[in-house]
Every structure is written in structure tokens, then in C-alpha cells.
Image: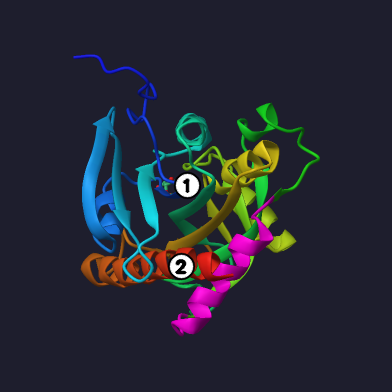
């Protein structure tokens, strides 16, 4: 039966002011399991969502998947905005672009800005405009990591449309400019927040591999690598949820 006022794709009438978003739909119930009283809110075309409350302060939170890439993310963000979302934190995965022990599988990144190497965000703001996380959200994510003694990297994330790039020199170029990791959604998330004006955005990402060192969760000791990655994801989730509480203290 059709229901009135549902957003067409996320199939929700309302979302909480705080939204945690993830590209991977399977991560949505996992994120929700860290909340108090989690419940599935909707599921349509793989766009699953849950609602719950932060365990410490009881802040209501909606967890949504964006799917992979900026076009799908733009649909979910717009509908989440129309339904009430105003603080949007991406809990995602990425690949590391710099060598080093702290850049391996499971490493945490809290990017302050993103390279807009994708075709969606220029539809929202011309390409000269920088994609930056909201400074307050970036700060609370970093503060939450510090308070939990979680090592993290900050820096610029390269957001791209192409996962399997035919041009392998691409990642070296952005790495030489100093980008620390690569994924596919943060630039659009950040630009969306800037353009709306009343939306604060940030991102916390867990590395599933290092492009320089050619390690990833799909090769080598797959089970071990996957466990290390999941441990990083767990830390990122805890950190994001703590950051929500810390933001509401400040
Ligand atoms: O952002 C990237 C994309 O959503 C990270 O993981 C997915 C590709 O495997």
C-alpha cells in the first residue's frame, strides 16, 4: 500500500537531525547496533535505514546507506535533508594513499577536505569551491578519537567516480599532492553541506587497503586482514557516535 509523504527512495517521512551515513548497506545495522533501542526504519532498493539513540546522551540518530558513489549519495542526502537531517556524518571505507605503518588496513582517517574528482558535486557548486568538512564536526570527530585513544590521520581525501581506474597513475598524482586516502562520496557530502548552508557534515573513514603498499582485504591473509579492517570500522563507529554526543555538549 502507498503511504503519503514518504521520501521516494529512502521511504521515510522523517529522519533525525543527526544522520550517520554509510556507503555499505550491510554496515547500517552494524552501526545501529551501537545505538540504544535500534530498529529498522525502512528498506527500499537496497537503501536500508535504522533509527536509534546515542547510548550516553540519548540523542536520536538515523542511520542510512547512500550506496556507492556520488549520484546515489546525492539522492539519499537530498531526501534525508527534506525529511529533517541537518548533521550528516559519513562512516565509510577508503584506500590509503601514503606509505607507513599508520596507513595500513584498519587505519582511521578524519578528512578535513576532499578532492572533487567526480561529476556530481559540480552540479551543486562550481568546481573552484572547495569541498570541506564542517570545522566543528571535523573537530568533534578528532576529539572523540583522541578521547578514546584511537590513532587517526587527518588530511585530504581524493573522492573519485572510478573505483577500477584504467589509469593507475591517477592515484600517484593525488598522493604526490598530499592526499592521504581515496574513496567515492566525501566530496559530495561536504559540498552538499556547504550549499545547503544549514547542514553540517563530516566523515570518518577506515582503510581497507594501501594502494602504495599493495595490501588490501581481498588479498594475502584475507581473514586476518578483514578482521583488522572490521576492528577499524568498529573504532570509527564508536568514534562517530561519541562525536555526536560531544557535539551536543559543545
Ligand atoms: O567510497 C568507496 C565506495 O563506496 C569506498 O568503498 C566503496 C567501493 O568499494
The residue under the point 37% across, 54% down is: 60
Give the CA separation, mark 1 to mark 2: 13 Å
Which residue is rendered at x = 25% and y = 65% of the image? 222
Residue matched to label 2: 245
On the image, the x and y values in percent for residue 218 come to 31, 58
Q: Toward the viewer: 94 or 74?
A: 74
Please name the predominant secondary structure of the magenta segment in the image.
helix
Q: Is mark 2 within 8 Å of ligand 1?
A: no
Camera sees residue 99: no
44 horizontally vs 184: left or right: left
Q: Residues within 10 Å of mark 1 (few under 14, many from 20)?
A: some
Q: Mark 1 falls on what kind of element?
A: loop
Residue drawn at x 60%, y 50% is 200
Q: Are marks 1 and 2 in contact (CB under 8 Å)?
A: no
Does the segment drawn in magenta span residue 135? yes
Q: Using residue 152 as the reference point, say whether residue 148 is left or right of it.
A: left
Q: What stretch of residues is rendered in magenta?
A: 132-150
Q: Quadrant of residue 143?
A: bottom right
x and y, in percent, of residue 240 in the image: 44, 64
> According to the image, label 1 marks what residue?
17
Give whichever of discs 1 and 2 has the lower sequence position: 1
At a point 24% along the width and 51% down the height, the residue shown is 29
Q: Position of residue 210 (x, y in %)?
A: 48, 65
Q: Position of residue 147 (x, y in %)?
A: 49, 83
Whether residue 76 is visible, yes or no, is yes
> As drawn, which residue projects farthest toward the top?
2
| 72 sits to left or right of 250 | left
Q: Residue furthest left?
A: 1
Q: Nearer the viewer, residue 115 or 46?
A: 46
Camera-side residue of 116 and 47: 47
- Element assignment for label 2: helix
Amino acid at each position: 500500500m502507498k503511504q503519503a509523504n514518504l521520501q521516494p527512495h529512502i521511504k521515510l517521512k522523517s529522519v533525525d537531525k543527526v544522520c550517520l551515513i554509510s556507503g555499505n548497506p550491510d554496515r547500517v545495522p552494524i552501526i545501529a547496533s551501537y545505538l540504544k533501542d535500534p530498529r529498522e526504519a525502512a528498506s527500499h532498493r537496497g537503501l536500508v535505514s535504522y533509527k536509534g539513540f546515542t547510548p550516553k546522551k540519548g540523542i536520536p540518530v538515523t542511520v542510512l546507506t547512500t550506496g556507492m558513489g556520488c549520484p546515489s549519495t546525492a539522492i539519499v542526502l537530498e531526501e534525508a535533508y527534506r525529511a529533517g537531517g541537518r548533521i550528516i556524518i559519513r562512516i565509510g571505507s577508503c584506500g590509503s594513499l601514503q606509505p607507513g605503518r599508520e596507513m595500513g588496513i584498519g587505519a582511521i582517517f578524519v578528512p578535513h577536505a576532499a578532492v572533487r574528482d567526480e561529476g556530481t558535486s559540480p552540479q551543486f557548486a562550481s568546481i573552484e569551491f572547495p569541498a570541506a568538512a564542517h570545522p566543528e564536526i571535523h573537530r568533534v570527530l578528532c576529539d572523540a578519537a583522541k578521547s578514546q585513544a584511537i590513532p587517526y590521520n587527518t588530511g585530504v581525501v581524493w573522492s573519485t567516480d572510478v573505483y577500477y581506474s584504467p589509469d593507475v597513475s591517477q592515484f600517484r598524482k593525488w598522493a604526490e599532492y598530499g592526499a592521504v586516502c581515496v574513496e567515492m562520496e566525501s566530496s559530495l557530502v561536504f559540498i552538499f553541506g556547504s550549499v545547503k548552508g544549514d547542514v553540517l557534515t563530516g566523515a570518518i573513514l577506515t582503510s581497507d587497503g594501501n594502494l602504495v603498499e599493495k595490501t588490501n582485504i581481498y588479498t594475502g591473509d584475507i581473514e586476518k586482514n578483514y578482521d583488522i579492517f572490521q576492528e577499524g570500522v568498529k573504532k570509527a563507529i564508536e568514534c562517530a557516535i561519541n562525536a555526536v554526543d560531544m557535539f551536543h555538549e559543545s
